[in-house]
Image (cartoon, rainbow, N blue to C red):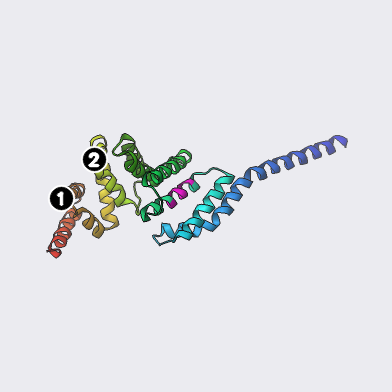
Amino acid sequence: MLRSRVATIALLALAITNASVIFYLSVPRLATAFLTISGDKVLSQIENGQFVDSDQLDELEKSRNAALGWMPNAKPYYDLGTVQSIRRQRGVSGIGPAVDREIFSLTKKSLTMSPTSGRAWLRLASAELRLNGDTKLLTDALVTSVLTAPVLPLNTFSRLELMLRSAKFEQSSDPRLMFRQMRIAWKLSAENSILYSAASLRRVALFRAALASDPVSYDRYNIMLNQHFTSRR
């Protein structure tokens, strides 16, 4: 009887200990999730292409910094990089290089914890170009961005632009990576692909090469391109 009670008490103690450990480990995650709620609506607006004002950006920044106070996580670091990127675009972030270094640092921390984020690799490549020019890191980041996230609807043309601006990328990477992005861009928006490629003869030539394997798309591209140039005369 005594042994049975001792065993029962031991099991209860073990259960309580396990529950306490689980609760202790879950507190930072629960706190992080709770603290980010106030900024989630702002982030959703950004991701949907809606305008957010400076106060909303401040709220998003505050919520992510509060979350990081409980537990380092890739997402808050990436979101803070988003805040700084928007401020930089609006010209309200102070000295350019300092902001770019901050964006680079935040994005690098995010990638350290979540190295499969294609959007984060793209942001790192963009910051690297502004900070150090056409480097091997830029090429590596671009390639990794494409491999980890082939389709980024909101970032397709910005990724193409980085590829076209990087001579090192063109020299050291497989051209099929760029051609695939151009085919994706075409499928996402033929109209925007025409507007983007019509800006230079080089872009036209590359888009034609990318679409050459699909006669229907190739012919439609050339028809729309001719119509575009005709309408501008």
Q: Do labels 1 and 2 touch, CB within 8 Å?
A: no
First along the sequence among labels 1 and 2: 2
Q: Secondary structure at mark 2?
A: helix
Q: Which residues are magenta?
A: 77-83
Position in image of residue 144 (x %, y %)? 36, 39
The quarter of the rendered structure image containing the N terminus is: top right
Mark 1 to mark 2 CA distance (whole Å): 18 Å
Across and down, in percent, residue 43 comes to 46, 56
Return the x and y of residue 137 as percentages of the image width and height.
34, 36
**Mark 1 element type:** helix
Up-down relation of residue 136 to residue 68 (above or below): above
**Residue 42: horizontal and vertical position, in percent?**
47, 59
Q: Is residue 225 magenta?
A: no
Side of 41 where 126 appears, left or right: left
Name the residue type under label 2.
Answer: Pro
User: 26 above or below 233?
Assistant: above
Q: Quadrant of residue 143?
A: top left
Quarter of the picture holding the C terminus: bottom left
Is there any visible trace of residue 43 in the rendered image?
yes
Q: Is residue 79 magenta?
A: yes
Return the residue at label 2. 175
Residue labelled with disc 1 = 201
